Image (tube, rainbow, N blue to C red):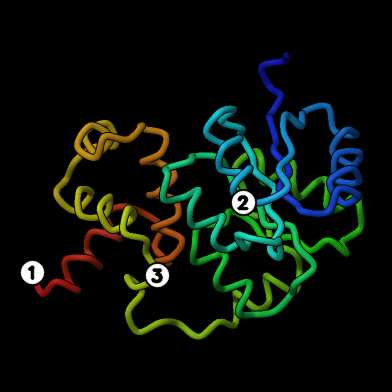
């Protein structure tokens, strides 16, 4: 397999939709589908087994919802980039998935060519959102306590960052991989709306009245 190829798992409870997504992704040689999952439980198992680079996650599924699946993946320190691919453009769904650690939120009714390019950009490290999603996020009221948006693990990482530890030292302290630490820091900075770990530390210390 080419070193530049990025592996993808599709998580959707509709077989026809999974087939359509697979056919779309086949048009981009840099992307390779390595697994499909019908529900959240399967997604967790396959993510552990294959460690894909990217997970395309549907929101509305039978059994575990997309939100529950996303939280479970992040709680298990799955380092894959997770892009939500759904029909829902409801503000609450968008806010909930972004807060839970989604790296992108794309709508299924997007133009296929545009959707493929957004998935590729998301796989390569960008945060990607459909146009209406960008608008909703830009106009979202700011929380008075941004730290409530962080997961327990992100708070753990933030505390170690505030102590001045490096990513390698944090990984050793929390018994997780260095790549997973980077994922948590990336999500943490986005949720706190700051650009650096120094700024996050200052915000944290101010909130603790230190």
Residue 2 vertical position relative to residue 84 in the rendered view, above or below: above
Residue 95 vertical position relative to residue 38 in the rendered view, above or below: below
Residue 149 - label: 3
Q: Nearer the viewer, residue 10 or 26?
A: 10
Q: Nearer the viewer, residue 56 or 116?
A: 56
- The image quadrant of residue 155 is bottom left
Q: Quick check: 209 left or right of 85?
A: left
Camera-nearest label, 1 or 3: 3
Secondary element under disc 2, as helix, strand or loop, is: helix
Camera-nearest label, 1 or 2: 2
Mark 1 Cα shell of 10 Å, populated few (<14), some (14-19), many (≥20): few
Residue 82 place in picture, x, y as percent: 60, 49
* Disc 3/disc 2 C-alpha distance (Å): 22 Å
Asked if labels 2 and 1 touch by Cβ distance under 8 angstroms, the answer is: no
Asked if labels 2 and 3 touch by Cβ distance under 8 angstroms, the answer is: no
Q: Which residue is mark 1?
A: 210
At horizontal 45% and vertical 55% (from top left) the residue drawn is 187
Q: Earlier in the sequence, mark 1 or mark 3?
A: 3
* Disc 1/disc 2 C-alpha distance (Å): 41 Å
Quick one: quadrant of the C terminus?
bottom left
At horizontal 57% and vertical 63% (from top left) the residue drawn is 67
Judge whether residue 65 can be spotted in this image.
Answer: yes
Residue 30 place in picture, x, y as percent: 77, 28
Q: Which residue is mark 2?
A: 40
Mark 2 Cα shell of 10 Å, populated few (<14), some (14-19), many (≥20): many
Q: Quick check: 18 left or right of 130?
A: right
- The image quadrant of residue 152 is bottom left
């Amino acid at each position: 397999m080419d070193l530049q190829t990025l592996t993808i798992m599709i998580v959707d409870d509709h077989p026809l939709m999974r087939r359509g997504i697979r056919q779309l992704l086949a048009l981009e040689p840099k992307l390779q589908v390595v697994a499909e999952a019908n529900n959240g439980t399967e997604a967790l198992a396959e993510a552990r087994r294959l460690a894909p680079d990217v997970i395309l996650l549907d929101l509305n599924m039978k059994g575990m919802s997309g939100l529950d699946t996303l939280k479970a993946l992040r709680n298990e320190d799955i380092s894959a980039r997770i892009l939500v691919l759904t029909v829902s453009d409801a503000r609450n769904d968008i806010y909930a998935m972004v807060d839970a650690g989604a790296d992108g939120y794309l709508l299924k009714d997007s133009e296929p060519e545009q959707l493929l390019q957004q998935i590729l950009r998301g796989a390569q490290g960008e945060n990607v959102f459909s146009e209406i999603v960008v608008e909703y996020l830009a106009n979202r009221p700011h929380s008075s306590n941004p730290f409530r948006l962080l997961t327990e693990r992100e708070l753990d990482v933030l505390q170690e960052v505030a102590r001045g530890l490096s990513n390698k030292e944090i990984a050793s302290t929390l018994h997780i991989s260095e790549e997973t630490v980077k994922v948590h820091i990336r999500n943490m900075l986005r949720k706190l709306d700051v650009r650096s770990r120094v700024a996050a530390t200052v915000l944290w210390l101010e909130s603790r009245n230190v």
